[in-house]
Image (cartoon, rainbow, N blue to C red):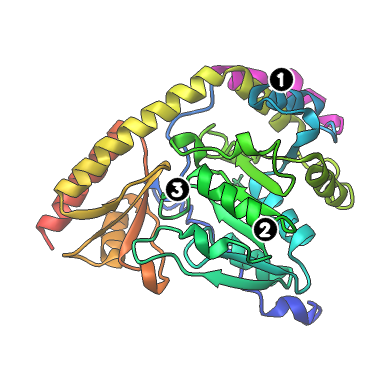
Amino acid sequence: MSKFLHPKYQSLSCYVPGEQPRDKAYIKLNTNESPYPPSPEVIAAVDANAVADLRLYSDPEGKCLRQKLADRYRVAPENIYLANGSDDILSFAFMAYASDGEPVAFADITYGFYSVFAALYGSDAKILPLREDFSIDYRDYLGIDRTIFLANPNAPTGLALSVENIEKILESNPGRVVIIDEAYVDFGAESCLPLVHRYDNLLIVRTFSKSRSMAGARLGFAIASRGIIEDLNRIKFSTNPYNVNRLTLLAGAAAIDSDHYFIENCERIMKTRTKTEAALSALGFEVIPSKANFIFAKHNAMSGEAIYQALKERGILVRHFSSPRITEYNRITVGSEEEMASLLATLADILASS
Ligand SMILES: *Cc1c(COP(=O)(O)O)cnc(C)c1O
């Protein structure tokens, strides 16, 4: 840190992304990427002509992709906002609705970025503990008159709230924005999309990173009332109008055009998830039933940390969090069938020799 940094940033604790080691080839099950490549249409869209066009700025309004997303999700283009990854949208939402002492609420165990943004923007954050079984009690959020951030399904637990209960939260906090982070919704949970036309305080955040196999392209989008989308644009056009690059806009449009490919992949991943959950249980793991592309599990014969280390030594990366309530767990991304077979064989081996 230099002596020039503003004091308000000197005590920030940054978000720690999942490790991306380069020392050897790992089976990577630690950052919830897709095991499958983007669709052939996406790969074809980013061609030499597209690269040659990089001398030109990207469309600051992302018209083509916004129109495709609007058609796909049955809203107007004015209800869609595009971003350089969905983390950018979460950041803007904190800036717009929860900065400088404004009240915000989120769970104690949830996406780690919420507490980082709350500190960055000086929010007055109320942390609401999950129940003992890691489920969210929606009643904790009724009428609390705070901006609310909910990951649905939640990370790293994989548990989801019903749309019916989210609607009660929206209804009881009409003066605040409720942000529903649907990063994993394509893997079997209910989306809040049908509520967008009825609640002007609902902001849905989506990403191409997980279910659409495009984590490296950095593409997120928001669906919300026109007013909220205008708020996000206000901040974007005051910071970085060309926030989504040309190649990513093309790739995103091609991904929507080849939607069947993405739906098949999600179905494949859900099938692999069900199989892996059963196999982990058979190995003695306690598995939380997941609606996401990861599985949160612990074993009573071995600590979460020890399992994480033993897997890493054998070339398999999973995500271990050291926060007290979840330190016995590991979050395991659902990879390909082959990757899961290696994981299960390796775990059987580790447990047998422990
Ligand atoms: C991965 C993830 C994101 C961030 O996704 P990007 O679009 O890659 O920035 C947001 N929210 C949750 C809950 C996530 O797990």
Mark 3 CB within 8 Å of ligand 1: no
Quadrant containing the C terminus is bottom left
The prevailing secondary structure element of the residues shown in magenta is helix
| Crowd class of label 3 (few under 14; some 14 to 19; many from 20; radius 10 Å) | many
How much space separates mark 3 and mark 2, taking CA atoms? Answer: 20 Å
Q: Which circle marks residue 48 in the picture? A: 1
Rendered residue at 73%/75% (across/down): 9
Instruction: Give residue 131's position: percent from left, percent from top.
Output: 40, 65
Quadrant containing the N terminus is bottom right
Mark 1 CB within 8 Å of ligand 1: no
Q: Which circle marks residue 173 in the picture? A: 2
Rendered residue at 65%/27% (across/down): 73
Pair 3/1: label in front = 3
Position of residue 242 relative to residue 1, above or below, is above
Q: Which circle marks residue 160 in the picture? A: 3
Say which amino acid is labelled 3. Ala
How much space separates mark 1 and mark 2, taking CA atoms? Answer: 50 Å
Instruction: Give residue 87's position: percent from left, percent from top.
Output: 65, 51
| Crowd class of label 2 (few under 14; some 14 to 19; many from 20; radius 10 Å) | some
Front in this rendered view, residue 21 or 127: 127
Rendered residue at 11%/59% (across/down): 353
Q: Which range is magenta?
A: 40-58
Say which amino acid is labelled 1. Ala
Say which amino acid is labelled 2. Asn
Pair 1/2: label in front = 2
Judging from the image, what secondary structure is the residue with disc 3 in?
Answer: loop
Q: Is residue 191 magenta?
A: no
Which one is earlier in the sequence, the residue at label 1 or at label 2?
A: 1
* Residue 309 occupies quadrant: bottom left
